Image: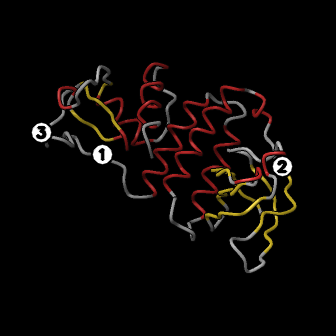
Amino acid sequence: MQGFISGITKLKNEDIIVQIITQNKFLSLYRFYGLRHSIISIGRKIDFDIEYNGQFIPKLRNIMQLGFIWESDYTRLYYWQQFLKLLNAHLRDTEEISDFYFNLLNNGALFLNKQNPARVLIEMYVKLLHFEGRLNVDSNCFICGEELSSKIAVVRGFLCAHHSCIPNNIQVIDKDVFLEFIGIGKSTFLRDNEVEYLLKSLLLGI
């Protein structure tokens, strides 16, 4: 079985519980002395077996890393791990999941070989919001309900609001540029500062 490690919970004696996103399940598996194995880290794609013993939770066995070239790049790895942590929290308390999440991660990991990591992540996030039916294409502020101006604030969940409706928010993005981005799901026409702004909104939580 293959999957992406999305979370690690430390237990006593260096044992850990590992959360893994597979093609159709969000798993929590027990690993003895997991912290002694460098392969056990968030974001890694692995091939593994599950040992069912009827006690506690199933055990993670026979791990093989399915690495990517970019994992030696600290910046790419950092952004990737942040996204996996957010997705881990998002899928918490679920078990049966759509293959969408595994495929999203698998394709995103391939794109990271050559593309800017911030652009890869915000494009992945738009796909996720669209799949879950949460992609906001409304031209009205989600706080006051009034029509948005030409410059908007984008917050968690890529929701749009008036700059004045968001306390302490000091950044804005062009409304038409943002709506075009979420409409086509590609960031090629976005400037770097716009990408970084949207990445900050993403990192607030999925």
- Which numbered disc, 2 or 3, marks the residue that appears first in the sequence? 2
Residue drawn 52% across the image and 66% down it: 94
Q: Which residue is mark 3?
A: 146
Check whether the beta carbons of the residues at disc 2 and disc 3 lie within 8 A of each other.
no
Q: Position of residue 18 (x, y in %)?
A: 69, 56
Residue under label 1? 137
Please state which amino acid type lies under the numbered disc 1.
Val
Point out which mark residue 190 bears.
Answer: none
Q: For the residue marked with disc 2, what is the amino acid?
A: Gln
Q: On the picture, is 137 further left or further right than 68?
A: left
Which amino acid, by three-letter code, is at mark 3? Glu
Q: Quadrant of residue 197?
A: top left
- Does label 1 or label 2 sit earlier along the sequence? 2
Q: Which residue is found at the position 14% from the left and 43% from the top? A: 145
CA separation in Å, label 3 and label 1: 14 Å
Give the Cα distance between marks 1 and 2: 39 Å
The residue depicted at 67 percent of the width and 58 percent of the height is 20
Q: Is 143 placed above or below 116 here?
A: below
Residue 65, labelled with which disc? 2
Going by the picture, which residue comes out furthest to the bottom?
Answer: 54
Q: Are marks 3 and 1 in contact (CB under 8 Å)?
A: no
**Which is more foreground, mark 3 or mark 1?**
3
